[in-house]
Image (cartoon, grey):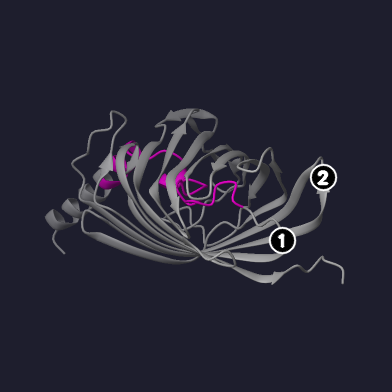
């Protein structure tokens, strides 16, 4: 290879690295929680004891990076992600503080393909496993419910400090508070509020800033069907820090799109599409979600 070609290749690599750094917040440009993942399952928990599963299939794609002002950067960038996530929910046959009690385990497997300046990379593997030791749900009335829990997204999975990864290299503690108002053959509206309280990555000495994720859904029930919209807003409200020095680059995203649900009572299917409307310091992603909720062992705590 000639010196001119070597210089051009090195120059492109340095430009790509610098441009990516300017356009990314959270370490590696990866949020410790995929905003929009909850779909129509906000404060929607089984009322009986048992073991339940929610299988989530997602395809997301993006064709550009956006700077702090929300404008697209002149960087040839593409990414596509396919994920399969298993959410296991244990519902217990007792109450705590007047609430139904649950435990949740989330296991995501991800395939990530990224192309920057024509240089492609692919990573497949386990992402960060999340555990909710105690999740509580109160029914304030026949149609109104609230739920609250504390999620721990652990430092697990296929993380790499030197290339795009399907996991983050740190633990994120995430308090969640959700409200839902659902009327049979009527309106269904809900909002979930989540904080992302991130610890430092011990490998890179980088601390991703903290953030807020607001997820929402609104629809109308017609028999077993529900038509509506779902969406999510992510706002990183504190700066990233590298070796204790503020880096800035706070991530912000907003997406919204149509949703359809078929609820057969014993099982539930939701298909939704979320269009990226706004992005800052990250990619503007569009996502398709297929969520299938099924009982694995209903009524395991019942007597008789």
Upstream in sequence: badge 1 or badge 2: 1
Q: Quadrant of residue 24?
A: top left
Q: Secondary structure at mark 2?
A: strand
Q: Quadrant of residue 267?
A: bottom right
Where residue 248 appears, as percent x and y from the top left, is: 42, 29
The numbered disc on residue 90 is 1
Residue that appears at 80% across and 41% down: 98
Of residues 121 and 139, the one drawn nearer to the viewer in this rendering:
139
Residue that appears at 44% across and 30% down: 247
Q: CA distance from mark 1 to mark 2?
A: 15 Å
What's drawn in magenta, residue-wise? Answer: 16-44
Label 1: how many residues lie within 10 Å, few (<14), some (14-19) or many (20+)? many
Residue that appears at 28% across and 28% down: 69
Q: Quadrant of residue 57?
A: bottom left
Q: Is residue 39 shown in magenta? A: yes
Circle 2 is placed at which residue position? 96
């Amino acid at each position: 290879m000639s010196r001119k070609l070597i210089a051009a290749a090195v120059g492109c690599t340095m430009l790509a690295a610098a441009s990516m750094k300017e356009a990314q917040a959270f370490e590696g440009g990866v949020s410790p929680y995929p905003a929009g993942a909850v779909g129509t399952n906000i404060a929607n928990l089984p009322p009986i004891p048992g073991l339940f599963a929610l299988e989530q299939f997602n395809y997301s794609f993006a064709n550009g990076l956006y700077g702090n002002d929300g404008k697209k950067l002149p960087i040839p960038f593409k990414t596509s992600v396919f994920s399969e996530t298993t959410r296991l929910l244990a519902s217990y046959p007792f109450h705590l503080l007047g609430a139904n009690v649950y435990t949740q385990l989330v296991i995501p497997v991800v395939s990530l393909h990224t192309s920057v300046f024509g240089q492609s990379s692919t990573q497949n593997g386990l992402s960060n496993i999340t555990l909710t030791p105690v999740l509580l749900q109160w029914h304030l009335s026949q149609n109104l419910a609230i739920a609250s829990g504390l999620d721990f997204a652990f430092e697990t999975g296929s993380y790499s400090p030197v290339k795009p990864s399907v996991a983050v290299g740190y633990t994120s503690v995430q308090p969640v508070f959700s409200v839902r108002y659902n009327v049979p053959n009527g309106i269904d509206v809900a909002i979930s509020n989540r904080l992302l309280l991130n610890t430092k990555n011990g490998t890179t000495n980088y601390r991703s800033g903290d953030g807020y994720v607001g997820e929402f859904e609104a629809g109308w029930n017609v028999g077993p069907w529900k038509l509506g919209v779902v969406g999510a807003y992510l706002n990183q409200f504190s700066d990233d820090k590298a070796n204790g020095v503020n880096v800035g680059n706070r991530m912000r995203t907003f997406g919204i799109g149509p949703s359809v649900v078929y609820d057969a009572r014993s099982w539930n299917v939701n298909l939704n599409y979320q269009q990226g409307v706004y992005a800052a310091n990250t990619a503007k992603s569009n996502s398709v979600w297929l969520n299938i909720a099924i009982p694995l062992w209903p009524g395991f705590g019942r007597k008789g």
